[in-house]
Every structure is written in structure tokens, then in C-alpha cells.
């Protein structure tokens, strides 16, 4: 029987899990989910969601178990790089394509050294030992920078390696930097900036591809709406040009007459950027009143 449902791999629990499921929910997809279930079925969309460890997501998509996956670029690029270095036949991994960048799960892969090191540049790492869970990306980076260092692979708790003299430095994910600070380390180089992305296997059959296009259209609509605002205000007709000039990011606001009032109109506009308090004050100074700034739930061109 031909498979008529699209499968997407999503992190089961962890930093990306909640945001990934929230995104699907904002796309109008309702999941039947029971505890410890691996596969959730969407009731109102031809989609099944596979809940797995994030490290396995690129492999699930590369081997056609799922057609799509939501994963950090760090995991995607590490898997691709590792496969390229360890397996000459990495065809499937290199066929993974990024369809959407989500803007959540932001972090960077960085090199960090103990605070007391007087770090003067990458040459520091020559002849040193670096602990990491990102051997593929680190090896590629060191090679591109002509640095000869030894890599020790660790699965977790990489930040304790210098204290226990397992390594001179580490290469790990950083977001706030608090973990580094509390372990007496300082960030000295960034290797990669990462965020969560939607990945796709390029060999998707046509019938599933059309479902994928619908899903991606909805995801883009949710992302676009996330930063946009709907602005409503009243403006004196003689101040309209000045007010329009201050309205953020709106190309063509809608002007609506106000019944029984000849001097004022209502202005409705969509701003694709945040509306700050000082912009609202500026609008008021130019004569605008009854200013409303509303969130937008969905937006489709
Ligand atoms: P799993 O059990 O699925 O293997 P994990 O422990 O490997 O989970 P998490 O810590 O949940 O992974 O992180 C998942 C992803 O979140 C990372 O791969 C990365 O893309 C992103 N992320 C954002 N900020 C950070 C951070 N400060 N540290 C680690 N990962 C981060
Ligand atoms: Zn993981």
C-alpha cells in the first residue's frame, strides 16, 4: 500500500521538544499523544510525529524512516561532517536539505579554555587536547585553521574535562555562557552559530511532497506572524502623511472614514517588525490617538 502520510521526527524531550510541538500545534495540527508513545498521529492532517533523541533525527530522515525532521543545525552539520569523515559513502546524509530556519534553539559551538590561560589566538591549541561531543565539526575546523590538536570525544559533561585534566580545553555548545563560567572556563572562539531547522530528505515521493509543501507554507505563516503586529489608530486627515511616515514597516496602510467625523480617519496597518513604545509616542506626538497594537496569529501572502 502506498504511504499517504508524511512522517516528521521531533525531539522527544529536551530543549527543542516543547517548541517543536508548539509549532506543529500553531500550524493547526492536533496530535493524539499518550505518555511514552513514540509515534503520534495527527487527527486533522496527514502527518505522523516520531518522538526520538535529537542525535538520531538526521539518520531517521537520511534513511527514509521519516521524510522531515526538526533538529539543531549543530546536530545536522555534526552528523553530516562525521559521516563524511568516517564513511566514504555518506550519500544519504549529504542529501538532507534545510527547508525552514525556525529561530529557536539558538546556541553556538565554541572553544573554551580555563580562565587563567592568557589566550592570544588559535595557535594556543597546537599540541593541546580538546574534549568535545562534536568531533566531526571540531576536526574540520582545526584542519581549516591548520591547527594540530588531539580530540577526546565525550558524550556529556564536557565542561569538567579541564578540571579533571582530561583535556586542556573544550569545544561545546554555549547559549548564555553560565555553564562555562561556573566551571571556570572562558569562551575564546566560535566555530558555528546554530538554531533549530526543518530538514527534508530530497528523495520525497510526489504525493508526500505536496503534503510537505502545505506544512511548510503553514510553518512560514506562523513564523511570519510571530514578529508582526497589527496597528490600528485614529489620525487627523491633515496629519496623515506625517503619521504614515512614522508607521513601522507598513507599505500601504488601509485608510477608513469614521462615521460622523470629517477631520479624522482610522488607519489600519500590518507591521512586519515589533512596535516599540517610542514609536507609539512618536505617533501620538504627530496627532494619532486610540492607538492599538495587536498580535497576529497567522499570516499567509
Ligand atoms: P537528547 O536526549 O534528545 O539527545 P540532548 O541532551 O542531546 O537531548 P538538549 O540539551 O535537549 O539535547 O539540546 C537539544 C538542542 O538544543 C541542541 O542540540 C541545540 O541545538 C539546542 N541548544 C540550545 N541551547 C543549548 C545549550 N545551551 N546547550 C545545549 N544545547 C542547546
Ligand atoms: Zn542529544
Image (cartoon, grey):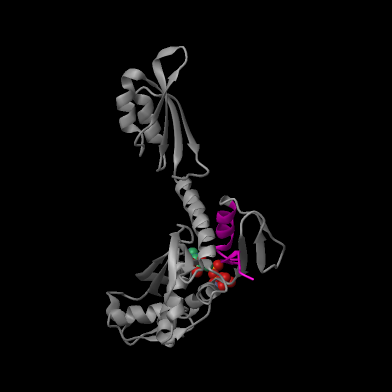
**Residue at the right extreme?**
34
Residue 283 lies within the magenta run? no
Query: In the shown orientation, is residue 178 left or right of residue 252?
Result: right
**Who is closer to the viewer here, 244 or 39?**
39
Query: Residue 53: x and y, percent?
Result: 58, 72
Residue displayed at 37% across by 74% down: 116
Picture layout, residue 142 above or below residue 192:
below
Residue 6 lies within the magenta run? yes
Query: Residue 56: x and y, percent?
Result: 55, 75
Residue displayed at 35% across by 30% down: 282
Residue displayed at 55% across by 55% down: 23
Residue displayed at 47% across by 80% down: 163
Picture layout, residue 252 above or below residue 58:
above
Query: Residue 95: x and y, percent?
Result: 43, 74
Total numbered badges shown on the rendered structure: 0
Picture layout, residue 55 above or below residue 40:
below
**Residue at the front extreme?**
1
The answer to whether residue 184 shows anywhere in this view is: no
Query: Residue 29: x and y, percent?
Result: 61, 54
Answer with the quarter of the image where residue 3 lies: bottom right
Check the picture and name the quadrant holding the C terminus: top left
The answer to whether residue 59 shows anywhere in this view is: yes
Q: Which stretch did the figure color magenta?
A: 1-25
Check the picture and name the quadrant holding the N terminus: bottom right
Amino acid at each position: 500500500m502506498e504511504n499517504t502520510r508524511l512522517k516528521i521526527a521531533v525531539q522527544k524531550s529536551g530543549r527543542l521538544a516543547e517548541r517543536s510541538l508548539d509549532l506543529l500545534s500553531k500550524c493547526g495540527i492536533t496530535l493524539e499523544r499518550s505518555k511514552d508513545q513514540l509515534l503520534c498521529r495527527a487527527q486533522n492532517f496527514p502527518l505522523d510525529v516520531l518522538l526520538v533523541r535529537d542525535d538520531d533525527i538526521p539518520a531517521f530522515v537520511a534513511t527514509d524512516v521519516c521524510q522531515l525532521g526538526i533538529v539543531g543545525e549543530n546536530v545536522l552539520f555534526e552528523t553530516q561532517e562525521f559521516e563524511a569523515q568516517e564513511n566514504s559513502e555518506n550519500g544519504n546524509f549529504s542529501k538532507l536539505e534545510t527547508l525552514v530556519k525556525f529561530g529557536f534553539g539558538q546556541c553556538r559551538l565554541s572553544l573554551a579554555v580555563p580562565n587563567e590561560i592568557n589566550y592570544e589566538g588559535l595557535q594556543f591549541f597546537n599540541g593541546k587536547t580538546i574534549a568535545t561531543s562534536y568531533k566531526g565539526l571540531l576536526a574540520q575546523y582545526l584542519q581549516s585553521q591548520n591547527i594540530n590538536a588531539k580530540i577526546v570525544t565525550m558524550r556529556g559533561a564536557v565542561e569538567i574535562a579541564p578540571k579533571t585534566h582530561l583535556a586542556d580545553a573544550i569545544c561545546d555548545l554555549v547559549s548564555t555562557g553560565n555553564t562555562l563560567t561556573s566551571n571556570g572556563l572562558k569562551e575564546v572562539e566560535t566555530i558555528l552559530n546554530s538554531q533549530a531547522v526543518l530538514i527534508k530528505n530530497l528523495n520525497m515521493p510526489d504525493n508526500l511532497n505536496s503534503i510537505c509543501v502545505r506544512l511548510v507554507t503553514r510553518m512560514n505563516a506562523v513564523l511570519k506572524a510571530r514578529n508582526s503586529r497589527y496597528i490600528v489608530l485614529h489620525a487627523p486627515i491633515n496629519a496623515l502623511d506625517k503619521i504614515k511616515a512614522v508607521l513601522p514597516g507598513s507599505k500601504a496602510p488601509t485608510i477608513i472614514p469614521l462615521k460622523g467625523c470629517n477631520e479624522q480617519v482610522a488607519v489600519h496597518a500590518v507591521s512586519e517588525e515589533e512596535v516599540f513604545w517610542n514609536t507609539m509616542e512618536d505617533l501620538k506626538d504627530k496627532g494619532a490617538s486610540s492607538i492599538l497594537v495587536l498580535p497576529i496569529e497567522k499570516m499567509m501572502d
